[in-house]
């Protein structure tokens, strides 16, 4: 996951570079469509988005706890 740019269509490039073999690098074109935020989401009133965000944060906390135990 990453923070999305402004709403619209974007043409991006993914560069995959190999450290061990020269000539194995790849450039992959990626088309990305970013939908605009709804008014409810922008104002923080969307309960579904809040629930999804809370679940995402909780899952990250669990992952960190598992890593600390190892």
Image (cartoon, grey):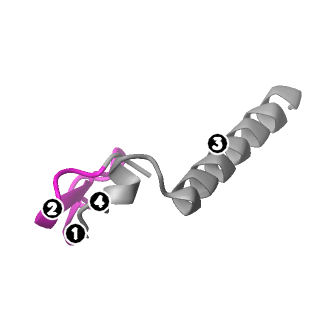
Label 4 close to label 3 by CB (< 8 Å): no
**Label 1 vs label 2: CA separation?**
7 Å
Q: N-terminal of the two: label 4 or label 3?
A: 4
Label 1 close to label 2 by CB (< 8 Å): yes
Near mark 3 (Cα within 10 A), the count class, few <14, some 14-19 or many ≥20, is: few
Q: Which mark is residue 12?
A: 2
**Label 1 vs label 4: CA separation?**
15 Å
Q: N-terminal of the two: label 1 or label 2?
A: 2
- For label 4, the SS is loop
Q: Which residue is mark 4?
A: 37
Q: N-terminal of the two: label 1 or label 3?
A: 1
Q: Provide residue 60's location: percent of width, then percent of height.
A: 67, 41
Q: N-terminal of the two: label 3 or label 2?
A: 2
Q: Provide residue 55's location: percent of width, then percent of height.
A: 68, 52
Q: Provide residue 61's location: percent of width, then percent of height.
A: 73, 36
In the image, what residue occupies the spot 81% across and 26% down?
68
Q: Is residue 56 magenta?
A: no
- For label 1, the SS is strand
Label 1 close to label 4 by CB (< 8 Å): no
Q: Which residue is mark 1?
A: 32
In the image, what residue occupies the spot 71% across and 47% down?
59
Q: Which mark is residue 57?
A: 3
**Which residues, given as a range, are shown in magenta?**
4-31
Left/right of residue 50 with respect to residue 17 in the rendered view: right
Q: Is residue 14 magenta?
A: yes
Q: Nearer the viewer, residue 17 or 49?
A: 49
Q: N-terminal of the two: label 1 or label 4?
A: 1
């Amino acid at each position: 996951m990453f923070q999305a740019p402004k709403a619209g269509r974007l043409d991006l490039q993914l560069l995959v570079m190999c450290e061990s073999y020269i000539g194995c690098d790849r450039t992959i074109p990626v088309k990305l469509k970013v939908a605009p935020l709804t008014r409810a989401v922008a104002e923080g009133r969307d309960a579904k988005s809040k629930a999804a965000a809370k679940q995402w944060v909780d899952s990250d906390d669990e992952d960190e706890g598992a890593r600390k135990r190892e």
